[in-house]
Image: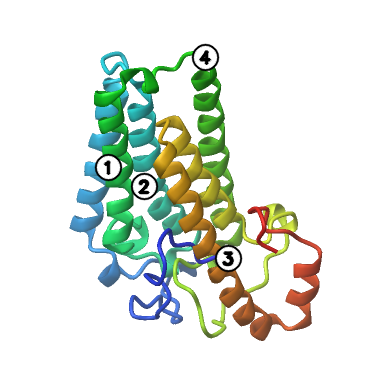
């Protein structure tokens, strides 16, 4: 159901196709190896693990722990995007499911900008990055939002299983069902909700005022448009079932109905 993407338009086409032709071995759905090159998957997972482990190891060393949390959360997010898709939705997993490079230059640029803002502010005004006073509570709120956002997104992908897609679908596939159980009974687009608050939480952890504002505005604008378009397709797929579902659930992203 949800087809999350952090930046506009990158997943709004069908070019990086997810096959509607199931591959089964011993009656179990399997990933298409032509879209999951073992060397590329292994190397990507290895590099994510190296960066994850490096910043876990640097926790006692770096004075500003927000950087550690940021990189650890970022590498874990991208690993889980592939892992959860491979485990619960193997027919649609492919190398781009890591969401590392398929999101385009904008996504990489956004995180680079956030880290540069943090670095520049730390050099110019070191006091702005100390977890004392009110900043201590801002960091805690940021961590809570990040952890909750990641948990909800991962759980949503697991619950939706074969109905989840990283690509906005313009036609109903054979295994696409309307999921209304679990988180979907309370959140209409839980993976979007999770990503939205995960991203904002990370900026709060870094005490990035500029990036916090920019990320919030850009993501809100993107998801408000994305949800509107996606729900038009979902209504065409499921008719009154989706209309009634929509009436009884909320997105839980501020000012998005």
Q: Are marks 1 and 4 in contact (CB under 8 Å)?
A: no
Q: Estimate the x, y position of residue 74 in percent, counting from the top left.
A: 37, 42
Q: Return the residue at label 1.
A: 48
Query: Between tags 3 and 2, which lies in front?
Result: 3
Query: Between tags 1 and 3, which lies in front?
Result: 3
Q: CA distance from mark 1 to mark 4?
A: 34 Å
Camera-side residue: 175 or 119?
A: 119
Q: CA distance from mark 3 to mark 2?
A: 26 Å
Q: Return the residue at label 2.
A: 79
Labels 2 and 1: the sequence-earlier one = 1
Labels 4 and 3: the sequence-earlier one = 4
In the image, taking residue 227 as reference, residue 73 lies left or right, namely left
Say which mark, if any, is on residue 133. 4
Among the 4 quarters of the image, the one containing residue 126: top left
Q: Are marks 2 and 1 in contact (CB under 8 Å)?
A: yes
Task: Kindly identify the residue that appears in the image at 43 percent across and 69 percent down.
Answer: 91
Q: CA distance from mark 4 to mark 3?
A: 35 Å
Relative height, residue 159 to residue 171 (above, below):
above
User: Image quadrant for the N terminus?
Assistant: bottom right
State the SS at label 3: helix
Q: Return the residue at label 3.
A: 224
Number of residues whose C-alpha sits closer than 10 Å to that of mark 2, classed few (under 14), some (14–19) or many (20 or more): many
Q: Point out the residue furthest to the front here.
A: 124
Q: Estimate the x, y position of residue 11 in percent, counting from the top left.
A: 40, 71
């Amino acid at each position: 159901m949800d087809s999350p993407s952090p930046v506009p338009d990158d997943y709004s086409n069908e070019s990086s196709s997810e096959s509607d032709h199931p591959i089964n071995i011993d009656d179990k759905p399997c990933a298409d190896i032509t879209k999951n090159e073992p060397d590329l998957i292994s190397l990507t997972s290895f590099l994510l693990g190296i960066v994850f482990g490096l910043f876990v190891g640097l926790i006692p060393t770096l004075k500003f722990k927000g950087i550690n949390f940021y990189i650890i959360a970022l590498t874990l997010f991208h690993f889980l995007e592939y892992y959860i898709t491979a485990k619960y939705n193997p027919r649609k997993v492919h190398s781009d499911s890591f969401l590392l490079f398929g999101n385009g230059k904008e996504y990489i640029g956004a995180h680079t900008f956030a880290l540069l803002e943090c670095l520049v502010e730390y050099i110019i005004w070191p006091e702005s990055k100390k977890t004392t006073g009110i900043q201590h509570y801002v960091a805690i709120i940021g961590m809570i939002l990040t952890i909750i956002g990641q948990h909800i997104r991962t759980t949503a992908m697991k619950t939706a299983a074969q109905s989840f897609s990283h690509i906005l679908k313009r036609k109903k596939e054979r295994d696409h069902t309307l999921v209304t159980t679990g988180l979907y009974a309370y959140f209409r687009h839980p993976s979007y909700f999770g990503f939205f608050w995960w991203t904002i939480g990370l900026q709060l952890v870094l005490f990035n005022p500029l990036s916090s504002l920019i990320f919030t505005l850009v993501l809100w604008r993107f998801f408000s448009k994305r949800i509107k378009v996606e729900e038009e397709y979902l209504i065409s797929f499921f008719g009154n079932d989706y209309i009634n579902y929509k009436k009884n659930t909320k997105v839980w992203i501020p000012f998005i109905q």
